[in-house]
């Protein structure tokens, strides 16, 4: 099964994508996580990506597309994958379709996690991410058992650099300008499924699995 997660920053794409990947035993490919790992390791890609991410802007398509195309060719993607944070522009979506077309494949679902802007700012301000394993929490809705410490691995959990309120506003503007048009794009391909992302994490997951099947 090949799935795309669509939605505004902070809509809960990553939270759901990790659980879907576990349930359906497919790799979770998050471009945001790939960029953050490169920033942590201070690679050339990380240094380039950071300049854009810290401003709430998209990393240029030419740095992003090849990365994803190489990743989905790997052996563990043979039975499908879930893309989280990609595609984010029409050119990225076209590049993905073209790459899959060459091997007679196509995406099966684009799941749009719908959350209004006013809910997003609260979610991002409360989000805490583990520096080590990438687990995501929220100070109110999904707190860690011990404040500031990851339940899974015991490392510190912190506010992401791009979750400051002014950067969140910029990311929302970029989302509406550049990513929202993908909703129409996948509607036209008849693979778009929209779920109400304001429900609890468990309820959103149930709605998504009802769409994807057992
Ligand atoms: P990326 O990491 O993809 O960020 P994003 O799309 O902005 O999404 P987020 O990770 O912020 O949110 P999410 O929807 O995954 O929400 P989450 O599950 O964490 O990208 C970061 C940057 O990298 C971009 O700005 C860009 O610069 C660059 N980039 C990445 N991909 C790119 C691409 N393809 N092209 C160009 N540039 C690219 O949830 C949010 C919070 O809410 C958490 O605290 C969570 O615990 C909580 N929560 C989740 N679900 C619920 C719920 N149902 N109820 C209550 N709380 C919930
Ligand atoms: Zn951790």
Image: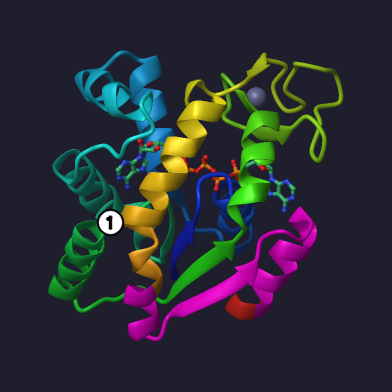
Q: Quadrant of residue 196?
A: bottom right
Side of 202 where 174 appears, left or right: left
The vertical placement of 70 against 195, above or below, is: above
**Of 147 and 70, the residue lying toward us:** 147
Task: Report the residue marked by disc 1.
Answer: 89
The vertical placement of 17 against 140, above or below, is: below
**Magenta segment:** 184-210
In x, y percent, where is residue 126? 70, 31
In x, y percent, where is residue 22? 61, 54
- Secondary structure under the numbered disc 1 in the rendered image: loop
The vertical placement of 10 against 75, above or below, is: above
In x, y percent, where is residue 30? 43, 44
Judged from this view, the residue extending furthest toward the right is 145
Residue at x 72% of width, y 16% of height = 154
Q: Is residue 96 visible?
A: yes
The vertical placement of 187 against 81, above or below, is: below
Q: Quadrant of residue 204?
A: bottom right
Verify whether residue 213 appears in magenta.
no
Q: Quarter holding the N terminus?
A: bottom left
Q: Is residue 213 visible?
A: no
In x, y percent, where is residue 25? 55, 59
**Of 68 and 141, the residue lying toward us:** 141
* Number of dots carrying numbers: 1
Residue at x 30% of width, y 40% of height = 58
Side of 213 where 187 appears, left or right: left
Q: In what quadrant does ligand 2 lie?
A: top right
Q: Quarter holding the C terminus?
A: bottom right
**Of 181 and 22, the residue lying toward us:** 181
Mark 1 vs ligand 1: CB below 8 Å = yes
């Amino acid at each position: 099964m090949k799935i795309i997660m669509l939605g505004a920053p902070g809509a809960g794409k990553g939270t759901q994508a990790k659980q879907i990947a576990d349930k359906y035993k497919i790799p979770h490919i998050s471009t945001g996580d790939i960029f953050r790992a490169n920033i942590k390791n201070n690679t050339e890609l990380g240094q380039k990506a950071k300049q854009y991410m810290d401003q709430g802007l998209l990393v240029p398509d030419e740095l992003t597309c090849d990365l994803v195309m190489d990743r989905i060719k790997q052996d563990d993607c043979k039975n499908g994958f879930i893309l989280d944070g990609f595609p984010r522009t029409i050119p990225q979506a076209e590049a993905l379709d073209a790459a899959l077309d060459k091997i007679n494949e196509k995406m099966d679902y684009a799941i749009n996690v719908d959350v209004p802007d006013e809910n997003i700012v609260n979610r991002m301000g409360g989000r805490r991410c583990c520096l080590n394993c990438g687990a995501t929490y929220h100070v109110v809705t999904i707190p860690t058992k011990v404040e500031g410490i990851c339940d899974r691995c015991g490392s510190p959990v912190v506010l992401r650099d791009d979750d400051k309120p002014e950067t969140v506003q910029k990311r929302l503007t970029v989302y509406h300008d550049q990513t929202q048009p993908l909703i129409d794009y996948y509607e036209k391909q008849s693979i778009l499924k929209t779920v109400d992302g304001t429900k609890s994490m468990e309820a959103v997951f149930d709605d998504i699995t009802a769409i994807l099947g057992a």
